[in-house]
Amino acid sequence: MEDATHPHERNRASYLTPNFLPLAEAGVLQLIDEDQAIMPGVRVRRTGGHTMHHQMIEIESGGHVAAYVADLIPTLAHVPAPWVMGFDLYPIDVLTFKRAFLREAVTRDALLLLAHDPTSAAVRVRDEQGPWLPCRRRSTR
């Protein structure tokens, strides 16, 4: 929250006060520093990298896993571990977390929800070396 309320030139675009300040002022914003379940089937994981305290959300239901990866993997082009954004403040942290996470995503057959891709809302990673399968329509699995 300190970073968000006191941005500098490099992270200013990551923290838009209309996105979080009204929630904080209303007293409904709960700050979470570490990985934790926030309700059954939903947990927050700290990834770091994009910003020091960047987080993603995992949702588990009926034996299936989806992960809202936010700015860790913003687009389909950013699925390969070495492809990081120029906006990332800690690119080596992104690389380190993403390598481990992609192996985990393959093992768990996780659906990765992409925050910024203009054509693919989600992707399944079958092998961390590729190919990556964009999900443009509902799966019948």
Image (cartoon, rainbow, N blue to C red):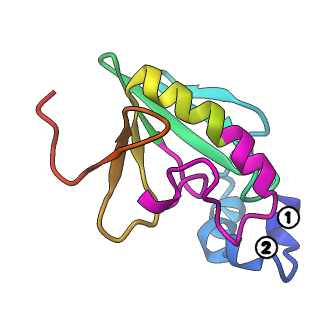
Q: Is residue 90 magenta?
A: yes
Residue 48, placed above or below residue 23: above
Secondary structure type for disc 2: loop
Q: Quadrant of residue 50?
A: bottom right
Q: Answer whether labels 1 and 2 touch (C-beta < 8 Å).
A: yes
Q: Quadrant of the C terminus?
A: top left
Q: Is residue 91 magenta?
A: yes
Residue 25 in the figure: left or right of residue 122: right
| x, y percent for residue 125 | 40, 37
Image point (45%, 20%), residue name:
107
Marks 1/2: CA–CA distance: 8 Å
On the image, numbered disc 2 is attached to which residue?
A: 11
Say what amino acid the circle numbered 2 marks: Asn
Say what amino acid the circle numbered 1 marks: Asp
The residue furthest bottom is 9
Q: Quadrant of the N terminus?
A: bottom right
**Residue mark closest to the camera, 1 vs 2:** 2
| x, y percent for residue 4 | 79, 66
Residue 129, placed above or below residue 40: below
Q: Quadrant of residue 116?
A: bottom left
Observer-nearest of 141 and 1: 141
Segment colored magenta = 68-97
| x, y percent for residue 71 | 59, 58
Please, what is the dominant secondary structure of the magenta stretch?
A: loop
Observer-nearest of 123 and 83: 83
On the image, numbered disc 1 is attached to which residue?
A: 3
Image point (71%, 64%), residue name:
25
| x, y percent for residue 56 | 59, 44
